[in-house]
Image (spheres, rainbow, N blue to C red):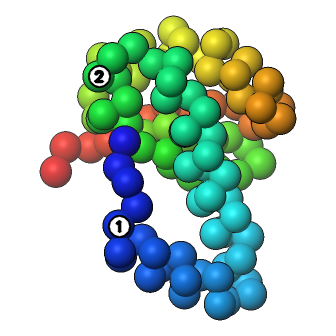
Amino acid sequence: MNKPGPQDQTVAAALGRSEPLTGLLQRMRESRARLDTVVPLLPSGLAEGMRAGPLDDSAWVLLVSNAAAAAKLRQMLPALEAALRARGWPGPPIKIKVLPRA
């Protein structure tokens, strides 16, 4: 999991000053908090190639580095979604997307 760096903090500060983008900042924070909730449930090494993705009313996206990780996460979706519900996030459902290779 990536830790926020100085550039992330600068972007967050800019978003916080823009009233129309305040909702976007809140969704970014919630997406990261959701990731923090599910990471402890993952097998060793799986979280390293994973990032929190977009969050909207239709889905929360987990971005993964390869198809094998995506397959494992899809098997774990019921447990991950249950953990999120237990923390007060009843939805939306989780979607898994594989990041394209650079």
The answer to whether residue 98 is visible is no
Q: Which mark is residue 94?
A: none
The residue where tag 1 is placed is: 5
Amino acid type, mark 2: Gly
> Which residue is rendered at x = 61% and y = 46% of the image?
33
Residue 85 in the image: x percent, y percent? 79, 26
Neighbour tally class for label 2: few under 14, some 14-19, many 20 plus, Cα within 10 Å: few
Pointer 1 or 2: first along the chain: 1
Residue 58 in the image: x percent, y percent? 73, 43
The residue where tag 2 is placed is: 45
Is label 2 in a helix, a strand or a loop?
loop
Q: Residue furthest top?
A: 75
Foreground residue among 3 and 95 = 3
- Decide if residue 12 is on the left or right side of residue 64: right
The answer to whether residue 47 is visible is yes
Amino acid type, mark 1: Gly
Is label 1 in a helix, a strand or a loop?
loop
- Decide if residue 65 is on the left or right side of residue 86: left
Do the residues under discs 1 and 2 have CB atoms within 8 angstroms? Answer: no
Is residue 57 depicted above or below 39 in this figure? below
Residue 71 in the image: x percent, y percent? 40, 15
Q: Whole-Å distance between the Cαs marked 1 and 2?
A: 22 Å
Foreground residue among 72 and 97 = 72
